[in-house]
Amino acid sequence: MKSKVKIFLSTGSLFRTDIQEKKTRIKHIQRCDHMPKNIFIEDIMVRDVACATLPGSRDEVLKILKNKHISGVPVLKDSKVVGIVTRTNLLQNPEEEQLALLMTRDPITIPPGSDLQTAARLLLKHGIRRLPVVDDGKLVGLVTVADLVGAIADMNIDIPIKDYVEKEVVAIYSETPLPVVARIMELAAVKAVPVLDANLELVGIISDRDIIAASIIEDSVEMSDMSSGLDDDAWTWESMRDTMSIYYSVSRIKVPNLIGRDVMIKEPITATYISSVSDCARKMKRNRIDQIPIINSNRKLQGLLRDHDLLKPLIEME
């Protein structure tokens, strides 16, 4: 492989190898004047963290999630973090009442003195959205993907997002029946899909929340306990992400026979390949979204940028 790269470079080709592109990105990142310096997890974490305690029950967790308008909480035993329980855990185990059997055990944690790169690496490596912050065995805070995106929004990382965009995107036709859209999202394990018209132009986006809002709730009591937080709640942005399995795993929502364009968000927030990392982070923070469709000048879909994609430049700068 090394010899091929050398031959490829010696020909003076206009194309660059992945190795070249990565080196170029790293050099660009290193030249950024406003990359994070001396920013630590304790600077961006949520300090007033709601918790559940063992032994506990489903009802106790539901009350916390509802009263605090949040999507998940660390679980403590003798003041130590032993698990995390989220809406997803509750919804995927509708018959289980014991907290010890509902929670995800031995969660990944992070010390408050860690830098942003360490948090980004852990979140990406383990495919998780939140990290309990632990100091001397005690819980002192919580940091999420949204917190890191918020920090990136306050920087000036001006490198283009092209290399971080997911180009294999599940999209749907605007006339697709909504139950089919919901099933596609379930099978593809995505929480939002871009919507295209007959000319393959982007005309909207549908998220799990849009489907839920348009659906018939068959169990109003349970849905009340699982409702999202208030718009001005500091945790709301993160809590929006754990609602999807309501209508899949528990089947308490009946998806109506509408079509995609009836419920889609028209004129969604978009970006292009040349948009900067921090600019896209600001769009996500300002609009409380976790994905942005990437389009060209003809509004043709090029890919999808998700919030966790914006964590990658933080790691590459090391």
Image (spheres, rainbow, N blue to C red):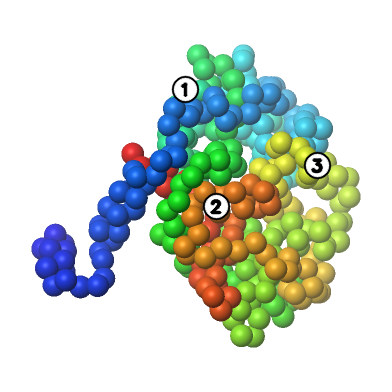
Rendered position, 32 above or below 301? above
Distance from disc 1 to disc 3, alpha carbons, whole Å, reads 31 Å
Residue 246's mark? none
The residue at which mark 2 appears reads as 279
The residue at which mark 3 appears reads as 230
Task: Name the side, left or right, on which 98 lies relative to 227.
Answer: left
SS for dot 3: loop
Rendered position, 105 above or below 236? above
The residue under the point 82% across, 69% down is 256
Distance from disc 3 to disc 2, alpha carbons, whole Å, reads 25 Å
SS for dot 2: helix
SS for dot 1: loop
Q: N-terminal of the two: label 1 or label 2?
A: 1
The residue at which mark 1 appears reads as 113
Picture quarter containing residue 48?
top right
The 10 Å Cα crowd at callout 3, few under 14, some 14 to 19, many 20 or more, is few
Rendered position, 280 above or below 66? below
Image spot of residue 280 (x, y percent): 55, 54
Of badges 1 and 2, nearer the viewer stands 2
Distance from disc 1 to disc 2, alpha carbons, whole Å, reads 27 Å
Q: Which amino acid type corresponds to the residue marked 2 in the rendered image?
A: Asp
Q: N-terminal of the two: label 3 or label 2?
A: 3
Can you see residue 308?
no
Rendered position, 294 above or below 88? below
Can you see residue 201?
yes
The residue under the point 80% across, 36% down is 66
